[in-house]
């Protein structure tokens, strides 16, 4: 008897000139600009979240210049959360107090900028794109890229819906459609899983340093009347981070008695016992922060990876049939703690490039890499290229180096190198544990699981686990011995647990338990795992966090 294999899945096919993966500021700005330049080009934007903006998380203070260029009249009908920046403060914290710096670093001077909810801003941008003829499909998760016989990217495949955890098809199974396009634009944000594959396939990082990341954890609070000064912006460094760990906070005063606040931890930290989520909660309980929040309530919470490699880590941003923009390319300006203006700028530049190639004959990504590297976006990154890696030698060296690089506008004749974040982690026996000097917390949430509740994350329990661990035996042997299972600490959503297990022979042991339903799609595990055995892939479309105004 001949084994004919599984029945092939029949898939519908949709054809577009351009398909864009990701409805963040880069993807939407690209789509808007391309339609402005040539209304005849068919453009489709797909987004894995349930609604546009539901999985967007950022500080976010934006520089308005690129948005002014994209939508000149936007200030007459701004996004629903949009507060003009007024006062900047920059502090160094100790455990019991702090000292305000006499001046704010130029990159943190927010005069003329706006505090926004980036999620709400993207939800505001989407209908403007649709009014120009862009087709936008939320809840459509791109599972893989499509290629022709030469390897050229020719579109994406949407993930199947209704697949059970064991891989079988549930009664409501729907095959994902194939979207064919002349050009595929990757705007997935930091550590996009399709981008990760394409970088490897086309060796896009052959001439660049490894990409680097931080994890940003954020909450939105409703606080009692009289505590908020709309437009006030506060940044801190110091406690609770030790001097060898890159970390700092942001606190933004919004309208309606709301405060957006968060903590950023560089994922190049050495301490295997470090917990980014706990560091954030400790900072909230600082005597200069806690009085703002006491008696208030959390409205929303979440976490995401932030791309921080900068100029030296930028991969090649074009390949046959596709290109990279925004955080997917790695354009965030770390000293400014801003990437939205860069995302919009790169999206517009990509649109202008494709429109020009069409005039010359056919849509073609070729030449975009050179155009981006010659642009203001890269000029901005080159000036600050040495600031973030300078902190690898400690807080105070980093501050002195940042001052030098700022004064010289990045004209140093050297470029500091970036290393992969996973490689920086010390083994347990080789690491001198820092003095944590933590306090007893009183503010919500009490633990990471409660934090997941505020992220409103939803995953069908009976779907394939989207966190792929290549060899779980490493977790209970080598990793336990060498690093004490750091995944149980660096994940902000308590996805990874080492639990007791009874083996078939009746003996007791340990195993890795993956609580995939908790996942907030931050990608930290895909970045910081010291054995590189964890791979994050997209779950079923519409799954994941549902942030409110983050």
Image (tube, grey):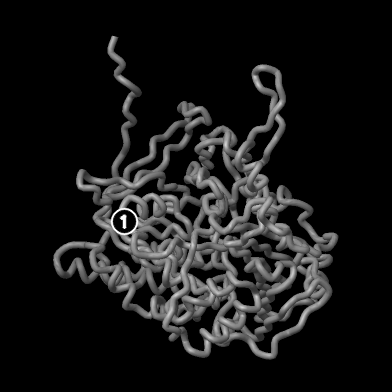
From the viewer's perspective, is residue 426 above or below residue 361? above
Which image quadrant is residue 207 in?
A: bottom left
* Residue 482, x across and y down, in percent: 63, 46
Which quarter of the rendered picture does the C terminus lie within? bottom right
What residue sits 49% from the left and 41% below the top? 540
Left or right of 123? Residue 16 is left
Looking at this view, name the residue that lies furthest to the front: 430
From the viewer's perspective, is residue 20 above or below residue 6? below
Left or right of 194? Residue 495 is right
From the viewer's perspective, is residue 106 above or below residue 6? below
Q: Is residue 117 at least partly visible in the picture?
A: yes
From the viewer's perspective, is residue 28 above or below residue 177? below
What residue sits 46% from the left and 62% below the top? 211
* Residue 442, x across and y down, in percent: 84, 60
Left or right of 29? Residue 352 is left
Left or right of 119? Residue 138 is left
Q: Is residue 340 at least partly visible in the picture?
A: no
What residue sits 79% from the left and 65% below the top? 296
Q: What element carries label 1?
A: strand
Pick whichever, 66 or 150, lies toward us. Answer: 150
């Amino acid at each position: 008897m001949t084994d004919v294999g599984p029945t092939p899945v029949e898939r519908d096919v949709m054809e577009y000139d351009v398909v864009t993966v990701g409805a963040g500021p880069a993807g939407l700005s690209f789509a808007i600009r391309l339609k402005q330049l040539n209304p005849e080009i068919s453009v489709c934007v797909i987004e894995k979240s349930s609604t546009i903006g539901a999985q967007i998380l950022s500080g976010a203070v934006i520089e308005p210049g690129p948005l002014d260029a994209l939508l000149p009249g936007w200030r007459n009908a701004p996004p629903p959360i949009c507060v003009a920046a007024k006062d900047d403060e920059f502090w160094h914290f100790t455990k019991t107090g702090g000292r305000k710096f006499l001046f704010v670093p130029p990159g943190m001077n927010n005069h003329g900028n706006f505090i926004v909810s980036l999620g709400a801003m993207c939800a505001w941008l989407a209908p403007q794109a649709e009014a120009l003829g862009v087709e936008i499909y939320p809840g459509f998760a791109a599972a893989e890229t499509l290629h022709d016989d030469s390897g050229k990217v020719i579109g994406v495949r949407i993930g199947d819906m209704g697949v059970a955890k064991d891989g079988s098809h549930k009664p409501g199974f729907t095959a994902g459609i194939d979207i064919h396009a002349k050009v595929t634009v990757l705007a997935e944000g930091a550590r996009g899983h399709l981008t990760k594959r394409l970088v490897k396939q086309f060796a896009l990082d052959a001439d660049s340093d490894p990409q680097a990341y931080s994890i940003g954890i954020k909450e939105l609070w409703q606080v009692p009347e009289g505590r908020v000064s709309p437009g006030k912006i506060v940044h801190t460094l110091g406690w609770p981070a030790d001097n060898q760990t890159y970390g700092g906070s942001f606190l933004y005063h919004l309208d309606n008695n709301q405060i957006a606040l968060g903590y950023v931890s560089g994922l190049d930290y050495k301490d295997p016992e470090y917990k980014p989520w706990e560091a954030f909660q400790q900072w909230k309980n600082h005597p200069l922060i806690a009085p703002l929040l006491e008696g208030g309530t959390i409205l929303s919470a979440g976490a995401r990876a932030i791309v921080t490699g900068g100029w030296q880590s930028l991969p090649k941003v074009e390949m046959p049939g596709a290109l990279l923009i925004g955080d997917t390319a790695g354009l965030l300006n770390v000293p400014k703690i801003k990437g939205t203006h860069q995302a919009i700028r790169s999206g517009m530049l990509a649109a202008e490039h494709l429109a020009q190639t069409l005039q010359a004959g056919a849509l073609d990504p070729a030449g975009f890499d050179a155009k981006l590297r010659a642009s203001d976006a890269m000029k901005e990154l080159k000036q600050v290229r040495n600031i973030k890696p300078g902190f690898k030698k400690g807080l105070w060296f980093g501050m002195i180096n940042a001052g030098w690089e700022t004064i010289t506008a990045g004209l140093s004749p050297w470029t500091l190198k970036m290393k992969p974040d996973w490689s920086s982690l010390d083994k347990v026996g080789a690491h001198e544990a820092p003095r944590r000097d933590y306090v007893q917390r009183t503010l919500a949430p009490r633990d990471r699981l409660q934090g997941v509740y505020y992220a409103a994350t939803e995953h069908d329990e009976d779907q394939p686990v989207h966190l792929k661990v290549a060899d779980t035996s490493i977790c209970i042997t080598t990793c336990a011995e060498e690093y004490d299972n750091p995944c149980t600490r660096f994940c902000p959503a308590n996805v990874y647990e080492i639990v007791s297990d009874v083996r078939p022979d009746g003996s007791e042991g340990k195993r890795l338990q993956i609580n995939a339903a908790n996942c907030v799609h931050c990608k930290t595990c895909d970045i910081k795992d010291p054995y590189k055995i964890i791979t994050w892939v997209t779950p079923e479309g519409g799954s994941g966090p549902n942030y409110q105004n983050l």
